Image (cartoon, helix red, strand yellow):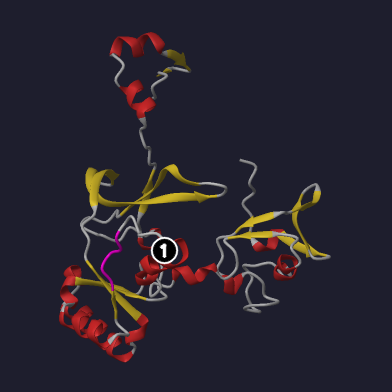
């Protein structure tokens, strides 16, 4: 793909330009696709003890000499208290009605919502507004009474720090685990590409809860991933070919047989 996987120490800023260190010398960098939170991007601007970012990166960014995706500041979209307002954002900015409905969400900073959540903790999923990776959350139906009471105290101490949603059922699929093939819960994270036109990617990231009975699919909590193939009309047509047709199209490859329809 021509995309280098680097760490902050692999980059250096000179004269407001970003370069990558290589065995052949410095190589100019035009765009950085980051996986590092804002706070750690540049110790000159944010956390001064961070070793994850690149010193001077923000100066090069402000000068327009490097692009950063996602742009600095877009982490606000990770704030779960923003989610309930997305339908209103669509109406305000696009003048359209949302196609997909939001998951019902209770904002614990609202008194009525808080009372509803406190009365139904055993049935709800409660999440920290700033939490991520499956941390800082309560899955009511799977929680112990002690865990529920701990969250009750946390909600009363800081209601603005939490939202709650109903427990949603997840699909399951056959998954290879230590004991063999077994069903595990999954969800699908689709991707939308926004350029001159908005396009839905033909596939996505399927996340798997590898622990039996678990609904937590986050990789940081022991979850896994699966390749996701979306079969269109062309692929579906190829899949309906007769076995004899597939056999005539097959070709030997190093001791294994590959067909044009797949392996």
Q: Main secondary structure of the magenta part?
A: loop
Pinpoint residue 23: horizontal percent, then vertical percent.
77, 48
Residue 47 part of the magenta-drawn span: no
Q: Residue drawn at (70%, 76%), measured in percent from left and top?
A: 44
Pinpoint residue 121: horizontal percent, then vertical percent.
19, 77
- Per the image, the residue denoted by label 1 is 90
Which residue is nearer to you in this view: 36 or 180? 36
Label 1: few (<14), some (14–19) or many (≥20) C-alpha neighbours in 10 Å: some
Q: In which quadrant of the rendered view does residue 34 lie?
A: bottom right
Q: In which quarter of the image is the N terminus?
A: top right
Mark 1 secondary-structure assignment: helix
Q: Quadrant of the C terminus?
A: top left
Pinpoint residue 32: horizontal percent, then vertical percent.
65, 57
Residue 104 part of the magenta-drawn span: yes
Establish if 151 lies above or below 79: below
Which residue is nearer to you in this view: 176 or 26? 26
Residue 179 visible to the viewer: no
Q: Give the range drawn in magenta.
A: 101-105
């Amino acid at each position: 793909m021509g995309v280098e996987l680097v760490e902050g120490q692999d980059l250096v800023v000179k004269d407001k330009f970003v370069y990558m260190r290589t065995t052949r010398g410095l190589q100019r960098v035009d765009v950085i696709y980051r996986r590092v939170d804002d706070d750690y991007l540049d110790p000159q601007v944010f956390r001064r003890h961070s070793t994850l970012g690149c010193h001077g990166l923000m100066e090069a960014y402000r000068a327009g000499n490097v692009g950063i995706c996602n742009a600095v500041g877009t982490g606000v979209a990770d704030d779960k208290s923003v989610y309930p307002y997305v339908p209103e954002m669509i109406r305000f900015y696009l003048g359209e009605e949302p196609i997909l409905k939001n998951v019902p969400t209770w904002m614990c900073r609202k008194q009525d919502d808080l009372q509803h959540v406190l009365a139904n903790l055993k049935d709800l999923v409660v999440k920290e507004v700033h939490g991520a990776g499956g941390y800082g959350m309560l899955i009511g139906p799977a929680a112990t009474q002690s865990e529920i009471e701990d969250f009750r105290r946390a909600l009363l101490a800081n209601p603005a720090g939490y939202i709650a949603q109903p427990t949603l059922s997840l699909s399951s699929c056959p998954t290879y685990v230590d004991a063999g093939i077994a069903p595990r819960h999954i969800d699908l994270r689709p991707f939308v590409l926004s350029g001159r036109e908005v396009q839905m990617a033909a596939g996505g990231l399927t996340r798997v809860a590898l622990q039996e009975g678990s609904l937590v699919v986050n990789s940081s909590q022991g979850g896994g991933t699966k390749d996701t193939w979306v079969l269109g009309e062309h692929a579906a047509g190829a899949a309906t070919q007769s076995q004899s047709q597939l056999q005539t199209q097959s070709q030997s490859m190093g001791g294994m047989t590959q067909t044009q329809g797949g392996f």
